[in-house]
Image (spheres, coloured by chain):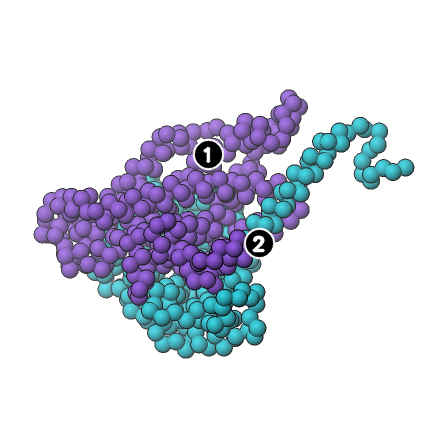
Chain colours: A cyan, B purple
Amino acid sequence: MATVPGVNPTLPASPARRLRIRWGEILRYVVLVALTILFLFPFYLIVRNALMTQPEITSFEWSWWPAMPQWSNLEVLFNDASAPMGSGLRNSAIIAIVNLVFQTLFASMAGYALARIPARGKTLVFFVILSTLMVPSAVTFVPSYVVVANLGLVNTIWGIVIPGLFSAFAVFLFRQFYLDFPVEIEEAGRLDGLGYFGIYGRLLLPNSMGILIALGVLSFINSWNAFLWPLVVGRSPSSWTVQVVLSTFLTAQTINLPMLFMGAAVGALPLVVIFLIMQRYIVEGVRLSGIKG
Amino acid sequence: MGTKREATFAFWVFMAPILLGLLVFTFVPIGWGFLLSLSDARNSVDIGNFIGLDNYAFMLQSPQFQDSLITIIIFTIFIVPLTLFASLGLAMLVNGAGWGRGIFRTAFFIPTAISYVIASLIWRMGLFSGVPSGVMNVVLYEWFGIEAPISWITSSNPPWYWLVLVTVRLWLQVGLYMIIFIAGLQEIPRSLYEAAFVDGARSGWMTFRHITLPMLRNTLVAVLLLNFIAAFQAFDEFWNIMGGTAASAGNRSLARPPLVYLYQVALGDQDYGRGTAGAFILTAIIVGVTLLQGRFFGFGRST
């Protein structure tokens, strides 16, 4: 008997229909694989060019891989005095970590208070915070610069990081989250003699690790990748972030292509690693902010 | 429960950092900026030399500011519908895949980890480099036999730079919106489709048109809004792809969005009065369109 495994021969399934669906699935995977190659190609291009010599990159003959990977491009990159890659990476790391810790902390504190602590004027405070969501953030860079300049924070990494620590949107998300938090846990804490601060520190924070990590990672990625505000505030090379350093390379008079792409590789690598490890949380963070927003 | 005083005290302690921060870095800039926009504030951030609405009139009549608005409108007309279709298409392709769903999702989502600066660098110096070794020129030569390399960024006629500017943002953001759409798709009850099949509907355009699309309505509106607001504030890719200090410096005038122009007015020419006036005009446009869109699509209306 020449029956196809898995197909019940007694049921006269329409062969045309089965075939049509099959072709649909094959088409789906052909398109998906083609798009995957297209989407990953820029990553390949960074690595290829970062490890090539300048003549290899600009050669008329396309080659898929350097004849001899030029790891020395890494040294050239870090020894270039005109654009300080080393301090750029350090500045970006400090800014992103401070941003992750404090933006998340401040927003979760406010979110908890708005969701769970009875106080007069709470509704008004909530609407004042919500109203700031109407203001498009990037547009206010001119007036914000004026204030930061008056506080004497221009050309410091604190001028770059501090104004970004207060996210009304994150407050909103934490408030939503704590509104759904089980009351029983809070009441158990009360019975154990905990006040509002104890409940927040010992019960709420440890039990909201998922949302803390999700929004924390998103704020880390956003601040590492930010460009306009660091460009505006960090005007001297010592306060440049890695993005400003790379932009300076890119718009310079003479361009050293291998160094440029090595810089891109070094600037992107930490984030690609974090992304791959934390993807589950990032998806959760995007889902939270995308749907509620 | 604690006393009322304890609660009030705790509430304000928890609220203090965010309220103080928003006061100093959001409300004060808006207030100060508004007063500056009414002042003659060249080379100074002092308020007082009030000149009424002159700065606003100047900006609205400035050909450069008008050009920048046209530039950003063209950009928005390209990028918003493209992102919407591409991200919904990817979401449906990935969500319907049985095998390898996670791999494909990661492949389309991972550009989110890359900054606009780095992506601009790859696009300008790698993919769309104007020399014969630029990847797109290699493709044109090898696959289509086109020998003369195209100057993707410096050519004003035809304006190939739009292809560069639109594709870089598409690559960077389409995965993010795909994730939002996948979440939306997964919330549609399967029973709706099953009921439709029982009624004789076939998988494909009919179920997409009558089930998927209406059920995604809120997600679609949210993506549309987020996308529009982000596109109108484009800066990074325009600055890094069109900008430069050497011979290429002239490219900037080919496509200069409002934020790049405001940067030049405020931080280049040190004219904070006109810079803030321009910022408020742009804010008014974004808020206005957002509210209109919300009204038009009935934002938040349940489906």
Q: Which mark is residue B281?
A: none
Task: Rate crowding at label 1 as few (under 14), some (14 to 19) or many (20 or more) other CA atoms within 10 Å.
Answer: many
Do pointers 2 and 1 mark residues of a single chain?
no
Residue B133, position as x, y percentages in the image: 47, 63
Task: Rate crowding at label 2 as few (under 14), some (14 to 19) or many (20 or more) other CA atoms within 10 Å.
Answer: few
Residue identifier under label 2 = A37
At 49% from the left and 68% from the top, the residue drawn is A59
Indicate left or right for A168 with A270 as reference: left
Height in image: B217 above or below B103?
Answer: above
Residue B156, position as x, y percentages in the image: 33, 52
Residue B288 makes an appearance in the image: yes
Residue identifier under label 1 = B218
Indicate left or right for B289 with B45 as reference: right
Indicate left or right for B61 with B111 as reference: left
Residue A149, position as x, y percentages in the image: 23, 61
At 28% from the left and 54% from the top, the residue drawn is B253
Which quarter shows the N terminus of chain B? top left
Q: Amino acid at mark 2?
A: Ile
What's the CA distance linking mark 2 and mark 1? Answer: 32 Å
Which secondary structure lies at badge 2?
helix
Q: Amino acid at mark 1?
A: Asn
Q: Quadrant of residue B91?
A: top right
Name of the residue lying farthest toward the top: B199
At 43% from the left and 62% from the top, the residue drawn is B131
Chain designation of label 1: B
Height in image: B202 above or below A79?
Answer: above
Which of label 2 and label 1 is nearer to you? 2
At 50% from the left and 71% from the top, the residue drawn is A56
Chain designation of label 2: A
Q: Are marks 2 and 1 in contact (CB under 8 Å)?
A: no
Which secondary structure lies at badge 1?
helix
Residue B169 makes an appearance in the image: no
